[in-house]
Amino acid sequence: MADRIQRSSPRAYNVVEVDCYTLDETATPVAARMSDLSLTGAFLDCMGGLRPGTRLALGFKVGEQQVQAKAEVVHQMPQFGMGVRFLEVSPGGRAAIEHLLKEQA
């Protein structure tokens, strides 16, 4: 059911590098690229996935806008990547995502 809710949000193709760190005491960096984006989350391409429930700090660009977000891993595809749900998105970042979605609609 959660997958269906996440997929109901329009998605935009947005391939960009992502600054990604775990939100725990280790603040472990995660090498990732974003392949698609919605208002509610994104898919991160990465070789090593993280367990569902892992919280992340993300930094990425949408057009010229730098976006800061906190997210949670909701599903993992080993050797391929992971889907994340946004918990918080910077106000300017949310507006940039909305604009991108309208452009690609």
Image (cartoon, rainbow, N blue to C red):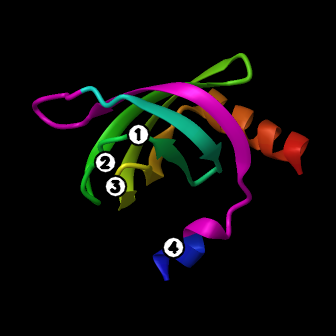
Q: Position of residue 78 (x, y in %)?
A: 34, 55
Q: Position of residue 17 (x, y in %)?
A: 53, 24
The residue sitting at 68% across, 36% down in the picture is: 14
Spatial separation of the CA atoms under disc 3 and disc 4: 17 Å
Residue hosting label 2: 49
* Marker disc for residue 78: 3
The residue sitting at 31% across, 48% down in the picture is: 49
Please check the rendered image and state whether residue 15 is part of the magenta-colored stretch, yes or no: yes
Q: Is residue 95 left or right of residue 104?
A: left
Q: Is residue 78 left or right of residue 36?
A: left
Residue hosting label 4: 3
Spatial separation of the CA atoms under disc 2 and disc 4: 18 Å
- N-term-proximal mark, 1 vs 4: 4
Spatial separation of the CA atoms under disc 2 and disc 1: 7 Å
Q: Say whether marks 2 and 1 touch (CB < 8 Å).
A: yes
- N-term-proximal mark, 2 vs 3: 2
